Image (spheres, grey):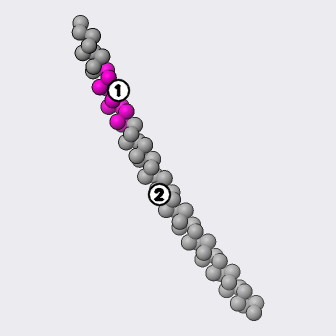
Amino acid sequence: MNWKNIFAEASFGNEVVKTGNDYARTGNDCARNGNADERSGNNYERNGNTDAINGNDYERS
């Protein structure tokens, strides 16, 4: 039995699994970017609420 070939195949298999993990991490980064975009949308909604408050002040005047 040639032990060197067995170890070489086992090492190569581990490298393939590590590459798969890198792809998973990249997917997580994309999800984080999506969350940042949603937060920006929430900021725009807050600005809209501020405009409504200013409108109430004009009515009081």
- Range of the magenta residues? 10-20
The mark that comes first in sequence, 1 or 2, is: 1
- For the C terminus, the quadrant is bottom right
Circle 1/circle 2 CB separation < 8 Å: no
- For the N terminus, the quadrant is top left
What numbered label is drawn on residue 45? Answer: none
Q: Is residue 2 left or right of residue 54?
A: left
For label 1, the residue is 14
Query: Residue 11 at x, y = what percent?
Result: 32, 23
Q: Is residue 46 left or right of residue 59?
A: left
> Alpha-carbon distance for marks 1 and 2?
31 Å
Query: Residue 24 at x, y = what percent?
Result: 41, 42
Residue nearer the viewer, 15 or 48: 15
How many numbered discs, if any?
2
For label 2, the residue is 34
What residue appears at the point 26 percent right and 13 percent down from the top-left corner? 4
Tell me which amino acid carries mark 2: Gly
Foreground mark, 1 or 2?
A: 1
Q: Say if 51 sits above or below 58 in the image.
A: above
Magenta includes 17? yes
In the picture, residue 9 is in which quadrant? top left
Tell me which amino acid carries mark 1: Asn
Q: Is residue 9 left or right of residue 21?
A: left
What residue appears at the point 40 percent right and 37 percent down from the top-left corner? 21
Crowding at mark 1 (Cα within 10 Å: few <14, some 14-19, many 20+): few
What residue appears at the point 45 percent right and 47 percent down from the top-left corner? 28
Crowding at mark 2 (Cα within 10 Å: few <14, some 14-19, many 20+): few
Magenta includes 1? no
Look at the numbered disc 2 and give the secondary structure of its residue.
helix
Query: Residue 49 at x, y = what percent?
Result: 64, 76
